[in-house]
């Protein structure tokens, strides 16, 4: 059992919260620049950032890009039904609740001990309509009613890798089943040169969705470094122009690939099935330094 310290202190006095959870050693590190800002790490790998005073603030680069997808999933402020596969510190669920009041959300986070820690140390708004299930992401998705979700976000990592069973066409069949007609699917992918994982995920999504876009740092897309890429998929035309504008205006500008350019980017990669699926690659140690 790790040591637990009370995070609810005055600015400047907050201390780290360190506990063993199912997935490793969890650390909640206070942000010295924001009074109630916290970073969650698991075994040293950054997982989430939350500002309890401003849940609409997204610090991590990839979460900002997922935030853009959330903003464009429906008219501004309109409540949505959202499913979050992978909970972390519930950053994106908090974002939806703050920017789209009265939304109904389901969070699927396998690590029950982590869920308990986050609920205790970084409590959710009591008025937010957020249900948390402590089960495997694919098993939790199977419990979502047919056609329920306007948006499904996949941000699942185990030991800094996306589990293999969340990378396949069969997994995306479950995503499609749970999505409303016209709903959006967004996935946080982590990869480095030669980007075989990302290319395979694009090819896989192309077998199940008619419209795709990929948002990432240009250096990641060029295979120059390990990093995150956000895959967006749906059946209706995606808001590519606005997504491009928003990604380009971020503190760390991102590039959007879609259409023929995205097809060319896959380089002939084959779709992934359950029988051939493998976890995403292990990040190099330098990523977390």
Image (tube, helix red, strand yellow):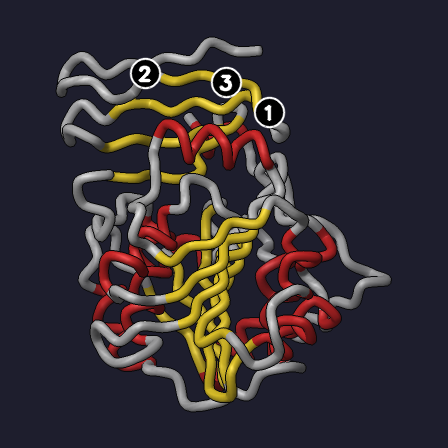
From the viewer's perspective, tell me whether residue 275 is left or right of residue 161: right
Find residue 52 and report its horizontal and vertical position in percent: 24, 39
Residue under the point 14% across and 15% down: 12
Which is in the foreground here, disc 1 or disc 2? 2
Instruction: Say few, some or many: other residues with alpha carbon within 10 Å of mark 2 (under 14 / 14 to 19 / 20 or more).
Output: few
User: Which image quadrant is residue 60 in?
Assistant: top left
N-terminal-most mark, 2 or 3: 2
The dot on residue 187 is none
Compared to residue 76, the image places residue 220 above or below, namely above
Q: Nearer the viewer, residue 238 or 78?
A: 78
Reading the chain from its start, which is encountered first: label 1 or label 2? 2
The local crowd at label 3, few if under 14, some if 14 to 19, many if 20 or more residues have their Cα within 10 Å, is: many
Mark 2: which secondary structure?
loop
Label 1 crowd (10 A; few <14 / some 14-19 / many >=20) = some
- Give the alpha-carbon distance from disc 1 to disc 3, as whole Å: 9 Å
- 75, above or below 135, in the image: below
Proximity of marks 1 and 2: CB atoms separated by less than 8 Å: no
Relative vertical location of residue 158 with respect to residue 166 in this rendering, above or below? above
* Residue 127, percent from left and from top: 29, 53
* Secondary structure at numbered mark 3: strand
Quarter of the C terminus within the rendering: top left
The residue drawn where x is 35% and y is 76% is 73
Q: Residue at x 54, y 55 (%)?
A: 85
Q: Residue furthest right?
A: 275
| Residue 19 tag number | 3
Q: Which numbered tag is attached to residue 24?
A: 1
Per the image, the residue denoted by label 2 is 6
Residue shown at 50%/76% (left/top)?
233
Q: Nearer the viewer, residue 219 or 162?
A: 162
The answer to whether residue 66 shows anywhere in this view is yes
């Amino acid at each position: 059992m790790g040591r637990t310290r009370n995070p609810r202190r005055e600015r400047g006095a907050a201390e780290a919260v360190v506990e063993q959870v199912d997935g490793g050693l969890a650390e909640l590190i206070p942000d010295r620049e924001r009074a109630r800002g916290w970073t969650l790490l698991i075994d040293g790998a950054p997982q989430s950032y939350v500002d309890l005073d401003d849940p609409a603030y997204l610090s991590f680069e990839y979460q900002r890009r997922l935030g853009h997808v959330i903003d464009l999933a429906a008219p501004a402020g309109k409540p949505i039904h959202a499913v979050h596969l992978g909970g972390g510190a519930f950053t994106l669920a908090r974002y939806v609740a703050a920017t789209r009041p009265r939304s109904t959300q389901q969070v699927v986070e396998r690590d029950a001990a982590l869920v308990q820690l986050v609920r205790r140390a970084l409590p959710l708004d009591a008025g937010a309509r957020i249900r948390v299930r402590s089960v495997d992401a694919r098993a939790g998705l199977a419990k979502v009613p047919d056609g329920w979700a306007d948006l499904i976000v996949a941000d699942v990592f185990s030991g800094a890798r996306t589990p293999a069973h969340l990378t396949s066409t069969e997994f995306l069949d479950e995503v499609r089943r749970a999505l409303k007609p016209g709903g959006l699917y967004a996935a946080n992918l982590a990869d480095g040169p030669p980007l075989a994982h990302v290319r395979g995920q694009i090819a896989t999504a192309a077998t199940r969705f008619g419209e795709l876009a990929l948002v990432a740092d240009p250096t990641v897309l060029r295979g120059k470094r390990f990093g995150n890429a956000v895959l967006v998929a749906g059946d209706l035309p995606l808001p590519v122009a606005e997504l491009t504008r928003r990604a380009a205006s971020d503190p760390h500008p991102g590039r959007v690939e879609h259409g023929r350019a995205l097809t060319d980017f896959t380089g002939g990669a084959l779709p992934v099935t359950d029988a051939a699926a493998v976890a995403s690659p292990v990040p190099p140690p330098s990523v977390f330094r």
